[in-house]
Image (tube, rainbow, N blue to C red):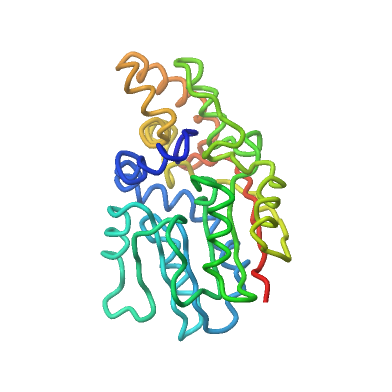
Amino acid sequence: MPGPHHGRSVALGWVGERGRRWREQLPAMEAMLAPVDAPLIEALRLEAPCRVVDLGCGGGGATLELWRRAPRGSVVHGFDRSPALVQVARQRMPAGAVGLGFDVADMGRPPPAEPYHRLVARFSAMFFEQEAEGFANLARWLSPGGSFVLAVWGPPEDNPWLSSVRRCVEQVVSLPALGAREPGPFRYAQVEALLELLRGAGLEALEVSDWRGTLPLGGGRSALEAARFALTTFVTFSEVLEAAGAPAIDEALRRVTALLTPHERGGVVRLGARVHLVTGSAPR
């Protein structure tokens, strides 16, 4: 999960260090976020063969699930700004897969010649470098009447999988402030800001529903291993802790493990999450 840095540095990070960290922890990250996939795909209403695009597809796990669940004859494309993650996604494609593909692109890219009937962005819309331009371009990726689903995190207090760990780490080191409208996980926690941008892009029939549940931190790990996962993968924590040195890392690991231990059941730590699912369509 990226940290709250300015758009350009976030963009470069996904191509470089942040992309590398995500790739190294890809199975754990995808397993952790998997509970969101079912409601996200259901909101797409894949009722007939269509062209589907997954923006910010990462290593392709959610895109592959979309492809499996889309009606026969559909085309499913995943795009990500990280060449390394796109390479991983391509390597995971089943032999002889028809209608499935992955390419490098972000929302600065012009729309494709053939637009899409469905568009999904799972936790990527919070990191558009230029908000208004990014959502205006998103609208151009859709065919007339085409629909979309965006998944963005709700308020920090409803997402203790990240916010409670952050507060724990802040007892050890000083972390960058979470800018309310800077690229970051809680950029659209107050979802009205996102709705205003979507309206400004000409998108319509906007609706918001919330998914609430629990996420297995690190994809199903004990308190100690989940703490290690968070401190090495969530870059807002890991970069600051690495700069602070081994004593700070050890103290943060002790504190976060103590925080997570009461939430461990059957060897797995689960923490609460709230996701805004924002749906809408392009004008006909």
Decide which of 48, 271 is in the foreground and name it: 48
The answer to which image quadrant residue 218 occupies is top left
Query: How many callouts does the rendering have?
Result: 0
**Quadrant where the image shows the C terminus:** bottom right
**Quadrant where the image shows the N terminus:** top left
Q: Is residue 168 above or below residue 114?
A: above
Q: Residue at x 44, y 33 (%)?
A: 223
Q: Is residue 268 above or below residue 114?
A: above
Q: Which percent across, then down, holds residue 158?
A: 65, 38
Q: Which percent across, then down, holds residue 274?
A: 63, 46
The answer to which image quadrant residue 63 occupies is bottom left
Q: Is residue 30 above or below residue 255?
A: below
Q: Residue at x 52, y 50 (%)?
A: 123
Horizontal side, residue 134 vs residue 241: left or right: right
Horizontal side, residue 278 vs residue 242: left or right: right
Q: Residue at x 59, y 45 (%)?
A: 153
The answer to which image quadrant residue 239 occupies is top left
Q: Which percent across, then down, holds residue 31?
A: 43, 52
Decide if residue 262 is in sight here.
Answer: yes
Decide which of 122, 6 is in the foreground and name it: 6
Decide which of 58, 12 is in the foreground and name it: 12
Q: Which percent across, then down, holds residue 62?
A: 45, 62
Q: Residue at x 36, y 51 (%)?
A: 27
Decide if residue 267 is in sight here.
Answer: no
